[in-house]
Image (cartoon, rainbow, N blue to C red):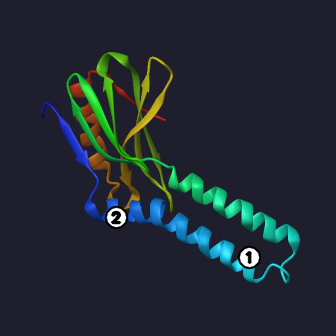
Amino acid sequence: MGSNINIELANWRKNINYITLRIFPFVLSVITVYAVILNFKEMPKAYSYVLLIGIPALSVYMFFTKYSVQTIIKPPYIQVYKNSFRGKEESNINFNSIHKLTCKIRYGKYGGTFFYLHTSANKKIEFITIPVTNMKKEYTDLIIKELEAIVGKTVEFV
């Protein structure tokens, strides 16, 4: 049992997240607008307006989405580093402000193991994500055991 945990996304996952959330939305919007402009007269009006408003709105949402790249759990703080459109953002959460820790396991295509911390100010922060490809019970049990030892709070399954 160590005194801290340092979990960082693999480089290939960082690259996929960057492409999916930073480059793809721009390309998708450009292609959609271009296709609608070329085919505006042949397309039903409602369909073209939905495409012109919906796809760029979805792209903006994707572009502004933050994703965790590193979590460091070291007394007395949990540091969560997230990539956003502005760069890397750091959040420091003091152990004293943590109300509870939860773990959610989802199976299927968009599954994975997700760890959340709930603060005294009623904020829910996702700080560890294990993709479905690496989702093994041994990893989850080990992380839970280490979290409980370091933070001093039990992890609840939801």
Q: Nearer the viewer, mark 1 or mark 2?
A: 1
Residue 21: image location, x then y, percent: 47, 59
Height in image: 52 above or below 87? below
Residue at the (31%, 44%) spot, across then down = 140
State how far apart marks 1 and 2 are (Cα).
30 Å
- Give whichever of discs 1 and 2 has the lower sequence position: 2
Type of the residue with mark 1: Val
Does residue 24 appear left or right of residue 50 in this picture?
left
Type of the residue with mark 2: Asn
Secondary structure found at label 2: helix
Q: Which residue does the numbered mark 2 point to in the structure image?
A: 15
Residue 132: image location, x then y, percent: 40, 58
Q: Which residue does the numbered mark 1 point to in the structure image?
A: 36
The one of 7 and 157 positioned closer to us in this rendering: 7
Q: Residues within 10 Å of mark 2 (few under 14, many from 20)?
A: few
Secondary structure found at label 1: helix
Height in image: 104 above or below 65? above
The one of 106 and 24 positioned closer to us in this rendering: 24
Does residue 64 appear left or right of residue 38 in this picture?
left
Residue at the (58%, 55%) spot, across then down = 60
Does residue 10 appear left or right of residue 158 in this picture?
left
Height in image: 79 above or below 24? above
